[in-house]
């Protein structure tokens, strides 16, 4: 494996981390400014004057839910763009806004390695922003998520982006079961992106726990790659797992292939002071 890397999301027209500190972060999503909890922001904020539209207040239990406290009117959803991809943002009960901006460097990395005739799969694809970013290359995509609502949102984003006719299969499936079936079918992919949650449920009540489910899923994903495949990207949030651990897991799974495994942290650059707020860890197989 290579040395630890840091991948940084830079501000773009429709997204920015404005400021952070005291366990919170102040962000701009198009015209809407939000405050959300962020344990990694252990420093002091650059400013105490955070003029937000809404702030997320977490619940006392551990299921990740909470509620938004509104200071100004916020629409049910609104449109954002990143390049040709257009998508809806909204305030969800799980504190995020229906996409993950810190994935931007991974989207760019994948796009650089795909093109017409390529095939790629996005597991735990959520509302499809990453899928659509990869689809911009002309590649054929398989988008998999256990949530029917998320897949419906992804298809709406495809229509919003003018990509409804792109070669994308939208599947409401349990990611682990689908990957295992693809192995049995002897399918192959040029690239795979997987962004698993800590906990989750499949469409038939299947239980997902990252500590027990990740290793077999990574093994199946590696079996779907061959010597001509370009990448497999694994991102992990909010778990007590090291980047070195998931890097070694992916390295062993792809030991039969050429290429290398990169590991490190992902973060977002703050506008106020140019510091980087860490958000996730990653490991990715790369075959240049």
Image (cartoon, rainbow, N blue to C red):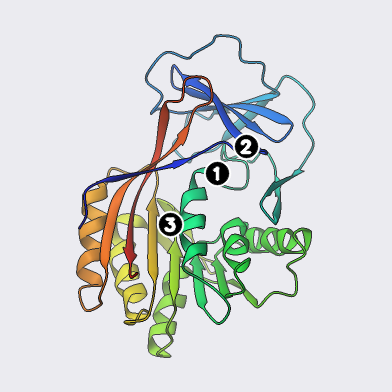
Between disc 3 and disc 1, whose residue precedes?
A: 1
- Distance of mark 3 from mark 1, alpha carbons? 16 Å
Q: Residue at x 47, y 77 (%)?
A: 178
Quarter that holds the C terminus: bottom left
Q: Residue at x 39, y 61 (%)?
A: 233
Q: Are marks 2 and 1 in contact (CB under 8 Å)?
A: yes
Q: Quadrant of residue 226 in the image? A: bottom left
Judge the density around disc 1: few (<14), some (14-19), many (≥20) Cα neighbours within 10 Å: many
Residue indicated by mark 2: 15
272 to 60, vertically: above or below: above
Q: Quadrant of residue 250 in the image? A: bottom left
Secondary structure state at the residue bearing disc 3: loop
Q: Residue at x 32, y 65 (%)?
A: 285
Q: Is 177 displayed left or right of 258 in the figure?
A: right
Disc assigned to residue 196: 3
Between disc 3 and disc 2, whose residue precedes?
A: 2
Q: Are marks 3 and 1 in contact (CB under 8 Å)?
A: no
Residue indicated by mark 1: 101
Residue 179's x, y, as percent? 42, 76
Secondary structure state at the residue bearing disc 2: strand
- Distance of mark 3 from mark 2, alpha carbons? 23 Å
Between disc 2 and disc 1, whose residue precedes?
A: 2
Secondary structure state at the residue bearing disc 1: helix
Q: Residue at x 51, y 78 (%)?
A: 119
Residue 160's x, y, as percent? 78, 58
Q: Is 127 displayed left or right of 216 in the figure?
A: right
Which label lies toward us, 3 or 2?
2
Q: Is 204 displayed left or right of 185 in the figure?
A: right
């Amino acid at each position: 494996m290579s040395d630890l890397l840091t991948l940084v999301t830079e501000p773009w027209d429709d997204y920015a981390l404005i400021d952070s500190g005291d366990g919170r972060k102040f962000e701009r999503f198009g015209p809407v400014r939000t405050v959300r909890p962020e344990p990694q922001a252990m420093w002091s904020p650059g400013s105490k004057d955070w003029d937000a539209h809404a702030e997320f207040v977490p619940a006392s239990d551990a299921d990740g839910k909470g509620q938004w406290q509104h200071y100004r009117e916020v629409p049910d959803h609104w449109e954002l763009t990143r390049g040709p991809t257009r998508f809806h943002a909204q305030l969800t009960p799980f504190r995020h806004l229906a996409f993950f901006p810190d994935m931007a460097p991974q989207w760019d990395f994948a796009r650089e390695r795909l093109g017409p005739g390529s095939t790629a799969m996005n597991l735990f694809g959520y509302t499809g922003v990453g899928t659509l970013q990869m689809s911009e290359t002309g590649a054929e995509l398989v988008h998999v998520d256990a949530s029917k609502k998320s897949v419906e949102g992804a298809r709406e984003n495809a229509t919003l982006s003018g990509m409804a006719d792109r070669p994308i299969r939208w599947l409401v499936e349990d990611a682990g079961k689908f990957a295992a079936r693809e192995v049995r079918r002897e399918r192959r992919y040029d690239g795979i992106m997987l962004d698993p949650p800590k906990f989750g449920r499949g469409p038939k009540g299947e239980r997902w726990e990252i500590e027990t489910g990740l290793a077999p899923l990574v093994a199946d994903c590696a079996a779907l790659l061959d010597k001509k495949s370009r990448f497999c990207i694994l991102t992990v949030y909010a778990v007590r797992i090291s980047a070195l651990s998931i890097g070694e897991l992916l390295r062993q799974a792809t030991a039969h292939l050429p290429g290398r495994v990169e590991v490190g942290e992902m973060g977002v650059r703050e506008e106020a002071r140019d510091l980087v707020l860490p958000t996730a860890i990653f490991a990715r197989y790369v075959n240049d």
